[in-house]
Amino acid sequence: MPRMTRPLVLLLALVSAAQADPKPEPAGVPKCRALDVADPKVVFEEAEDKLSTTCLKKLQAKLQQKWCSAENKGKKFDYMTDYDHTIGAGQYEKKVKGAKATHTCRVVNK
C-alpha cells in the first residue's frame, strides 16, 4: 500500500467504528410505578425522580392520596413496584428489581 493511503484507511476505520457503536443517550428522568399484583399491566400510580429511594417516597405519597379516604381507614392495598432505575455502571449495570408491597391506610387524607 502506498504511504499516503495508510493514514486514510486508518482514519476511515476509526470513523466507521465510532459510528457503529454510539453511546446511548440518557433516557430522561427514571420513573417508578405501582402495579396491580393480579395484572401487572394495570398501573395504579407513577412517580419520577433521579434517585429510586426518593421516587418510592413520592410514589407512596401519591398512593396515600389516592387510596386513603375515610371509608378506607385501616384497609390494606397490595401492589408491585416497578422501576426504570439502574444500579452500577458499565458491565455491572443492573435494573432495580421491583417487589410486592402493601400500603396500609393508617391516616385519612384531609
Image: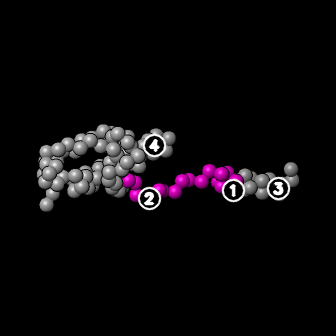
Amino acid type indicated by mark 4: Glu
Amino acid type indicated by mark 3: Thr
Amino acid type indicated by mark 1: Val
The local crowd at label 4, few if under 14, some if 14 to 19, many if 20 or more residues have their Cα within 10 Å, is few
Location of mark 4 (residue): 93
Contact between marks 1 and 3 (CB within 8 A): the answer is: no
The local crowd at label 1, few if under 14, some if 14 to 19, many if 20 or more residues have their Cα within 10 Å, is few
Location of mark 2 (residue): 28
The mark closer to the camera, 1 or 3, is 1
On the image, the x and y values in percent for residue 14 come to 69, 53
Q: Is residue 108 magenta?
A: no
Q: At numbered mark 1, what does the secondary structure look like: helix, strand or loop?
A: helix
Amino acid type indicated by mark 2: Gly
Q: From mark 1 to mark 4, how far is it between C-alphas?
A: 27 Å
- In the rendered structure, the answer to whether residue 110 lies left or right of residue 47 reads left
On the image, the x and y values in percent for residue 12 come to 74, 55
Location of mark 3 (residue): 5
> Which of the marked residues, 2 or 3, is nearer the chain's N terminus?
3
> Which of the marked residues, 1 or 4, is nearer the chain's N terminus?
1
Q: From mark 2 to mark 1, how far is it between C-alphas?
A: 28 Å
On the image, the x and y values in percent for residue 4 come to 83, 57
The mark closer to the camera, 4 or 3, is 4
Q: What number is the disc on residue 86?
A: none
Query: Given the current orientation, which residue lies at the most extreme front position?
Result: 71
Q: What number is the disc on residue 15?
A: 1
